[in-house]
Amino acid sequence: NFSMFVLDFDFNVVSSKTYAGTEPVFVDFDFEGVNGTYVRLVIDGVMAVPELQVFGRVVGAPPTPLTDFALGKPTEQSAVGAGGLPEYAVDGDVGGYWGKNTISQIPGPNSYWTVDLGTIAVIKNVRIFTRHDCCFELMNNLDIDILDHKLDVIATQSFIGSNPLFINIYFDNVEGSFVRIRAPGDMNLAEVQVLGGASLNANLYSPIQNLALGKPARQSTTLGDIFPASNAIDDDVYSVCHTQGGTPNYWMVDLQSIASIKNVEIVNRLNCCQENLNDVEIFILDYDLKVVKSEKFLLDKPAVVNAVFNVNGTYALVAVPGVFAVAEVRVFGWAGGPVPATLPNVAVGKPVEMSTTWGDAVAQNAVDGNTGGRWGVDGLAITSKHTSNYLMVDLQSVAAVRDVRVYGREDCCFDLLDGLEVDLLDHEMNLLKTQSTAGHHPLFQNFRFENVDASYVRLRGKEELALAEVEVLAGQSSASVYDPVSNLAKGKNATQLTTLHDRGADLAVDGDLATSTFSTKGLGYWMVDLGVLATITHVHVYNRIDCCKENLNTFTLQLFDADYNTVSVKSFQGSEPEFLDFNMDRSTGRYVRIVVPDNFLMIAEVQVYGREVEAHEYGRLAKDLPANIENFALGKPTEQSTMVGTGYSSYAVDGLTTVYDPMNLTITKDGFKNYWMVNLETISDILDIRVWNRADCCYDSLNEVSAEILDKDMKIVSTANFVGQDPYVVNLYFNNVQGSYIRLNSPDKLYLAEVEVFGTKAANAQEYVPISNLALGKPTDQRNTRNGGVPQLAVDGDISTHTYTGLGQVHWMVNLQTIASIKSIHIFNRQDCCREFLNSFTMYVLDYDHNVVTNQTFTGNEPDFVDFSLDNVEGTFVRLEIEKGRLMLGEVQVYGREVATVPDREKNLAVGKPTESSSVRSAGKPEYAVDGNTGGYWGTADKLVLTKENEPGYWMVNLEIPSAIRNVRIYGREDCCLEIMNTVEIDILDAAKQVVATQSFNGDRPKVINFYFEPIVIGQFVRVRTPGQLAMSEVEVYSAGPAPNTGAAVVAL
C-alpha cells in the first residue's frame, strides 16, 4: 500500500496515484503526460525500494531557484517540546522524521515560530515541510505573518487543510524581514523555506542587538560592593548582580532611546541559587515610565527566562519578590530615535504637605530632586498606614502640566502605588482633572495630562503612601492670573461641643490625618476660627481614617462671617466618606463649623482654602470701629421671665459663648412668651447685640427673637427683629443707639448661652442712675384668692405663675416699702389662657398715705404685655383694679429708683381702741374699723362697719388718752356703694368730748380719704359723720409724719 505524487518545481502536487495489492514485484503508474519536477513516494511503514524509474520528456528547465532567506537564520518559538529546537526548521533538511533531530516541535496552545531573515527580502512564497512520520493533523490550521524589520505585521495568510505533508503559501512579492507561523495548538516543523529575492531597501534593515549592553542600570539594593546592577549588562555570564534579601527587589536598565524591543532574556546565575528566578515579572516602560507591557513567569529554577514583547520602549525592568541575582539581562531589539526632551520639573523644592508622616520621612523629601527610593540612603516621604492619605505640592505659579511622574520606594512595598490618583487643581483649589491607575507598577507611575494649567498637584493613595519623588513636568502657561489660596485653618483656634479621651478640636487643624477629634455622642459641633475674614474657595473634610467612618454619614457644614451670621450652608449625606471637597464659591467668612445631628463627631482634618480679606473684629472692619469697643453685658445684672431648673439669667453674661451643659445655660419655660433683660449699668452707644444659641439642642428657640434697647429710664428707644432657621448666633445691629438696658423677647422658650452687647461708653454716661424692679418680692394683697393664685405670684420673678381672684370688682396691690421715683410699670398677663380679663383695667400709683398720685387706664384685646411709661412719678403703692372680672397677673414689674424712706408714723393710734357707732346693720360692728384690716369687701375675711340706711350715721373711736393728731385715714367699702362716703365730716374731740377741730369732705365714690391737720390737733376722740348710712372698713389715726400742705381733706383713692 503506497501513494505516488508528481510535484511541480514549487512542490505543489500536480497528480497522485495510489496502489493497494499484495507483495508486488513491480508496479507501473500511468500519469498520462503530466508536467512535473519532483516525484514523491509515500508508504505507511518501512520503505525498501530497489529502483524508481520516471519516464517522460524534458519540456523545459525549471525556473532559477529563488533564494531561501530562512536557511540558517536566527529563530525562536513560543516553547520547546521534547528538544525540538526552533533552529531545526532552518537547517536545510526537509526530511520529516523525528529521529534525525531535524524537526522543531512547538507545544500549544497558541504556539508560534519565528525566523529573522537578517535582511529585507522580497518574499514570493513560504514553504512549510511538515513532519512525515505522524501528527499530520497538527498542521491543519495555520496563520503565516510577514513582519517588517520593526516587527510590524504587514501581511498575513491563513491555511486550512487536511493532514498536509507540505504547505506552500504565496505572498506576491511582499517585502519583509521576519516570518511568523502561528497555530491554535501544537506544531511540528520539518523545514521552513522563505523564498524570494533581494530588496532594494535592504540597506534599511538593522540587525537585532542586545540594547542593554553597557547601558545605565540600577537596582533596588546591592549586596556588598562587588555585585552592582552593571554586572548584568557586561556580557559576562560569570559576573552577577546581587541585591539584598528580605524584601522585594528590582533591576532596571535605561536603553537611552525609544527602542523596538523584541524580547528580554535573563540568564540565571550559573553556580547556584537559580530558584531566585522562580517568580519573576518583566516590564517594558516608555520614556515617561509608563508600563507598555509586562510578562510574569512562575518557573522552577530556570537557566534562562525569555519574555517576548515586540513593543517600543525605553526601560526594561525586572521585579522579584526576594533576592535578584543573575548573570546577564539582555534586551534584544533595535535602537530607535532619541527620547524627547524632558520638560522642566516645576515641583522640585516647592512647598509640599502630606496627610500624615511616618518618622523622619517628611513630605519635603518628595520634591528634593532625588528619585532614589532606598530607605536609609535616599530621602523618602512616607505616610502612616491608613486610608485617605495624600501629598500635595504647591507649584507657586500657574504651570501647563504635561506629566506628573511618581517614583515609589525601591527597596520594598512596590504595591503602595497601586490605585494611586493624581489631581490637578487651579490656584483656588478647584479640581481640574484627575487620573488614576487601576493596575500595578512596582516603582513608577507617569500620568499624562497634556498641558493642563494648574497650580497644585495632589496625590491620593488608598492606604499608605511611600514616595521617593514627585516630578511635575510642565511648560509655560498662558494664564495671566495667579492668586494662590492657602489652608487658613491649620493651627488656628478650634473648639468643639464636648471632648472624649482628650482628643480635642485642635486635632482637626494639626495637619495630621492620623489624629482625630472625638466628641460625645449626640448633637455636636466642631468649629474653627480662621482669625481673619477670608474669601473661601474650598473646604476639605477628612474623616477619621482608622475606623468609625459612619459617624460622618450625615452632617452640615456652615460658614459664618465675623459676626457669626450664616454665610453658606452645605449638607452631606452618604456612606462612610473618607474625603469630601466642598466648593464654597468664594464666600467670605471667618468661622467654619461642622454639625452632626446624633452621633460621635470624629474628624481627622479640616482644611479651609482661601485668601485673607482684612483684619477685623466684632463683625466690622477694624478701621471702622472705635478703639474702645467692649462687651457691656458681661457680668452685669440680669433677669428673665421664667426659669427651668437652674437656668439662671446670669448664665447669659458669664462669658461662656458655647455651652453644652444645661447647668450653665439660661433656660426659660416652654409655652410662654418669654423675655430676658440685662442692665448695662451705664449709658452705652450700642453697635451690635450678639445672641449665642444653645449648642447641644433646641436651636429653634432663637428662630423668632427681638431685641429692645431701653434708655436709662426703661423707655424703649430702638427695636430689631430676627427671623431665621435654627441660628447658631443671632446678630442684631444698631447704629450707635444709646441705651442702658437690653431686653430680648421670644414668642416661646428662650435658651441662651450668652448675650454680648458691643459698643462704647456714651459721652453722657455720667447721667446714668440705676433703676430696678422695686416690686420684686415685696408685700402684696388682692381682694380675694382663687385656685391658689395668691397675690405674691405677681412679684415672684416668673411670668409662668399667676394670681387668680374671684369674679367681680377686684384689685391687686403691691407695697414698694419705699418712696420711689417710678419710670415704668410692666404688666404681664396670664400666659396660658384667659387673656381677655386684662382687656380693661386701671393702674394707680399711690403715695405712702394711699393718696392717688397718678392713674392710667388700659383698654385692649387680650394683651400679653402692658407697659405704662411714667415720668418719675413718686409713689409707694401700685394698685390695679378691674370693675368687673378677674385679675390673673403673670407678673407686675415696677421700675424706678428709691428716693426716700417712708416716714415713720410710729403706729396707728386707733387700732384696737374702743369704738361706738350710731347703729349696726347686718353685723357691721363699729370695732371692725380698728381691727387692722383695710380690706373693703363685704362677705369675705374683711370686716366692715355698716350703719342703718335712711338716717344720719356716725362712728367714733376713743384713743383713751389725749393724743397729737395729724392724719386720719378712712378706708371705704370697695365692692359697692362707694357713693355712701361722698359726704363725710370728721371731728376731733378732747377728753371732755368737746370738738376741737372739724374737717369736711365732699367727693365722688371715694375708696380712701385722708384728713390732714396743720397744725397738729390734740384730741382723744375721733368721730366720723355722714348725712346718711355709713360704710367703711378701717379708720387709722396717726400723730407723726409730715402734712403735705395745710390741713385739708384729700381723696386718696
Image (cartoon, grey):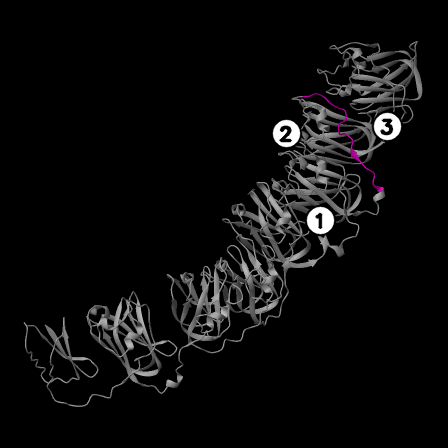
> Gap in Å between the C-alphas at discs 2 and 3?
38 Å
Q: Is residue 1046 above or below residue 378?
A: above
Q: Describe residue 1025's horizontal placement relative to residue 996 as left or right.
A: left
Residue 275 covered by magenta stretch:
no
> Gap in Å between the C-alphas at discs 1 and 3?
41 Å
Q: Nearer the viewer, mark 2 or mark 1?
A: 1
Residue where numbered disc 3 is placed: 901
Question: Tag 1's secondary structure?
Answer: strand
The crowd level at tag 3 (other Cα within 10 Å; few <14, some 14-19, many 20+) is: few
Q: Which mark is residue 834?
A: 2
Amino acid at the residue labelled 2 = Cys
Q: Is residue 172 visible?
A: no
Of pointers 2 and 3, the one earlier in the residue sequence = 2
* Quarter holding residue 1028: top right
> Gap in Å between the C-alphas at discs 2 and 1?
36 Å
Q: Nearer the viewer, mark 2 or mark 3?
A: 3
Question: How far from the left and from the top, in percent, is residue 384?
Answer: 56, 53
Amino acid at the residue labelled 3 = Thr
Amino acid at the residue labelled 1 = Tyr
The crowd level at tag 1 (other Cα within 10 Å; few <14, some 14-19, many 20+) is: some
Question: Tag 3's secondary structure?
Answer: loop
Region of the chain picked out in magenta, as a range: 767-785
The residue positioned 15% from the left and 90% from the top of the image is: 59
State which quarter of the image contains the N terminus.
bottom left
Q: Is residue 950 above or below residue 255?
A: above
Q: Describe residue 232's horizontal placement relative to residue 474 as left or right.
A: left
Residue where numbered disc 1 is placed: 733
Closer to the camera, 67 or 757? 67
Closer to the camera, 583 or 701? 583
